[in-house]
Amino acid sequence: MSDMPRRSTGSGGLSDPRWDEVDEYLALRLLPADDALDAALEASSAAGLPPIQVSPLQGRLLTLVARLTGAREVLEIGTLGGYSTICLARGLAPGGRVVTLERSPHHADVARRNLDRAGLADRVEVVVGAALDTLPTLPSRGYGPFDLVFIDADKPANPLYLRHAIDLARPGAVVVVDNVVRHGTVADADDPHPDVIGNQEMLNLIALSGALEATAVQTVGVKGYDGFLIGIVRG
Ligand code: SAH
Ligand code: DHB
Ligand code: MG
């Protein structure tokens, strides 16, 4: 059927031109012109960073979640060029701050410049290092308990990141995880990709521990077929 989503070459996922068209349609109506985010994308691209940041509409969702949560203390795992970081920081309550963890010193440099240009450098600290090394140092650096955690780094570590997030968050905190569907692979028990296994193990951890009241929403758009998980840390 010609109007059904079809297999694309490349990612192995599904795609349909309407996904991009609808994202564009919605963004034109819902999102303002945004010099800071445009500049961040341009600088990130010029610096050779991969274009895997959240989409503009997804970024707005992060801003809204931060605002809905009344978040003052936000943790992000996986900074890249700071696109999602800007979105999170914009949603902060007065006096709030974001600490964002990034393994690549180059990505962190680009992100700091983007945050500075966005006028948010006073509210954000980029911590360089592998997140599994830097997460345990956050309390002694004066960070936490967190009101909101956004997990968006190396997917095989997602079960471990979720454990840390729950430990470092206050009861009632919101946890958002990007890329939990990945072209539908999450439901494939035979997919050997470490990213897929990471998401499956994270979901099994949620199922077994009951530590989160969570849902996951499948999405399509300029980032293809994917989805995010959102949950509240139980008391
Ligand atoms: N949240 C960003 C995108 C992050 S892409 C946005 O939407 O704008 C994932 C990032 O995680 C990359 O910059 C990568 O360098 C970083 N990363 C990968 N493994 C990591 C690790 N072990 N610790 C910290 N960061 C890591
Ligand atoms: C990709 C997308 C992401 O949002 C991410 O965090 C990592 C990788 C990707 O499309 O490859
Ligand atoms: Mg992502």
Image (spheres, grey):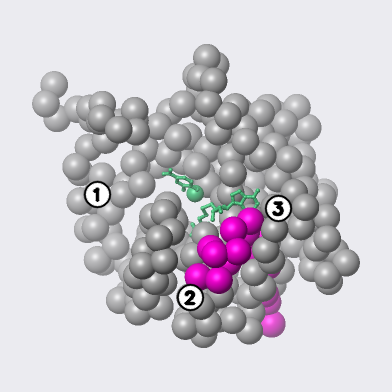
Disc 1 to disc 3, how far (Cα)?
32 Å
Residue 173: x, y in percent?
A: 72, 56
Residue 35 drawn above or below residue 171: below
Residue displayed at 28% across by 54% down? 23
Q: Is the Cβ of the residue at disc 1 closer than 8 Å to that at disc 3?
A: no
Which residue position is annotated with label 2? 114
Q: Given this view, does label 2 or label 1 mark the residue nearer the observer?
A: 2
Extreme residue in the top direction: 190
Nearest the eye: 100 or 31: 100
Name the secondary structure under disc 1: helix
Residue 142: x, y in percent?
A: 83, 71
Which residue position is annotated with label 3? 131
Mark 2: amino acid? Asn
Which residue position is annotated with label 1? 20
Nearest the eye: 229 or 82: 82
Name the secondary structure under disc 2: helix
Is residue 207 in sight in this rendering?
yes
Mark 1: amino acid? Asp
| In the image: residue 211, left or right of residue 34 | right
Q: Which residues are magenta?
A: 95-110
